[in-house]
C-alpha cells in the first residue's frame, strides 16, 4: 500500500514562505505524475502544481511565479516551495501521486494545513 506523508505546513504572515514536503513509501519514479492540490473550507479541491517523472512542471495560474514544485527521486520526496504567500493561499494542501496502469490509480496524502494570516 502506497503512503504519502505531507509535512511543512503551518501559520505564516502574508508575504512569507513555506516549504511543503511529501514523502512516499515507495519509489516515486514509478508515478507518472505527482502533484499538490489544495482545498479551502467550503470549496472544491483544486490543483496547485504537477510534475512529471521527467521533471516537467505545470502550475495553476494563481500560483505561477510564486510556487515551485520539485521532486527528488533518490529521497522519494516531492516538494512545494511557496513564496509571497497570500491569505487566499490558506487551505489544506494534499499530495497526489498518479500511477498509470490499465487505468489511472490516484494516491493521496492526509494533507497539511497552511494558514496565511497576520
Image (tube, grey):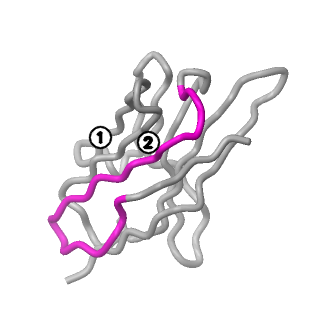
Looking at the image, which residue is at 26% across and 80% down?
Answer: 117
The boundaries of the magenta stretch are: 8-28
Please provide percent x and percent y for residue 72: 38, 29
Q: Residues within 10 Å of mark 1 (few under 14, many from 20)?
A: many
Q: Is residue 117 magenta?
A: no
Please provide percent x and percent y for residue 26: 59, 33
**Closer to us: 44 or 118:** 118
Q: Residues within 10 Å of mark 2 (few under 14, many from 20)?
A: many
Please provide percent x and percent y for residue 14: 19, 71
Looking at the image, which residue is at 75% across and 31% down?
Answer: 104
The answer to which image quadrant residue 113 occupies is bottom left
Q: Is residue 27 magenta?
A: yes
**Closer to us: 49 or 94:** 94
> Element at badge 2?
strand
Contact, mark 2 vs mark 1 (Cβ under 8 Å): yes
Q: Quadrant of the N terminus?
A: top right
Up-down relation of residue 93 to residue 21 (above or below): below
The residue singled out by tag 2 in the image is: 49
The residue singled out by tag 1 in the image is: 68
Image position of 115 (left or right of 94): left
Give the mark nearest the N terminus, 2 or 1: 2
> Element at badge 1?
strand
Q: CA distance from mark 2 to mark 1?
A: 8 Å
* Residue 81: numbered disc: none
The answer to which image quadrant residue 85 occupies is bottom left
Amino acid at each position: 500500500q502506497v503512503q504519502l506523508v505531507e509535512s511543512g505546513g503551518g501559520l505564516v504572515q502574508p508575504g512569507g514562505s513555506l516549504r511543503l514536503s511529501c514523502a512516499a513509501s515507495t519509489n516515486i519514479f514509478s508515478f507518472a505524475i505527482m502533484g499538490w492540490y489544495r482545498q479551502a473550507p467550503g470549496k472544491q479541491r483544486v490543483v496547485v502544481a504537477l510534475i512529471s517523472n521527467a521533471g516537467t512542471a505545470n502550475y495553476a495560474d494563481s500560483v505561477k511565479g510564486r510556487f515551485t514544485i520539485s521532486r527528488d527521486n533518490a529521497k522519494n520526496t516531492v516538494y512545494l516551495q511557496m513564496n509571497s504567500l497570500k491569505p487566499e493561499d490558506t487551505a489544506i494542501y494534499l499530495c497526489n501521486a498518479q500511477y498509470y496502469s490499465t487505468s489511472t490509480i490516484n494516491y493521496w496524502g492526509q494533507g497539511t494545513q497552511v494558514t496565511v494570516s497576520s
